Image: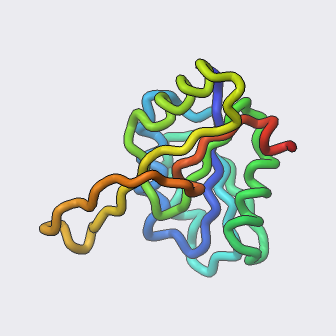
Amino acid sequence: MSGYGVVIPAFNASTTIAETLQSVAAQTVRAELVVIVDDGSTDDLASAIVGADLPVKLLRQDNAGPGSATTRGIAALSTPFVATLDADDLWLPTKIEAQLAYLERSPQTAGVFTHQRNFRHDQPDLPDPPATPGWSRTTMVIRREVTEA
């Protein structure tokens, strides 16, 4: 299976980034590199990513928003596939495996998205809402050439 890199734009995400990185590390297909772009945070994001069981590169920029941070992170990758993830979101363990398999079977496909589900850490007694189609940064895997076009 071809390699992929992950881009995580992060703004004041020191309380959520460790769990996000754990979900990336738990993938059945390991990322070649995770690029975290600190988008002008005022918290201690760098300390929160220490100890991640992943190859991580931290970039910093003045606050310019998640789109700018994502674009900068993509430019730092050279992998054939790019996955993106928000700093407060989680992936299920086989997400990337399924998406890469689809992209390898379908060379004409530029990118794929998955379903998504909101979770409630603060209200664990409530049932999980149903999964819905997700057209978002967190559910996307795209081919490198698409990012360059």
Q: Residue furthest bottom?
A: 42
Give residue 93's position: percent from left, percent from top: 39, 37
> Quadrant of residue 122 in the image?
bottom left
On screen, residue 120 versus residue 144, left or right, reads left
- Scheme by which the image is coloured: rainbow
Q: How many marks?
A: 0
Query: How far across and how far down the image is residue 102, in percent?
Result: 55, 26
Q: Is residue 7 above or below residue 68?
A: above
Residue 71 x/y as whole percent: 77, 57
Q: Point out the residue furthest to the right here.
A: 149
Q: Identify the residue shown where x is 50% and y is 47%.
A: 52
Q: Quadrant of residue 6?
A: top right
Q: Residue at x 59, y 56 (%)?
A: 137
- 120 on left or right of 56: left
Residue at the image position 38 percent from the left and 43 percent from the top? 92
Residue 27 vertical placement versus 84 (above, below): above
Quarter of the figure with the C terminus: top right
Quadrant (top left/top right/bottom left/bottom right) for the N terminus: top right
Front in this rendered view, residue 16 or 106: 106
> Please, is residue 123 above or below residue 115 in the view?
below
Q: What residue is drawn where x is 64% and y is 56%?
A: 36
State which quadrant residue 4 falls in: top right
Q: Residue 90, how many percent across, how many down?
A: 42, 53
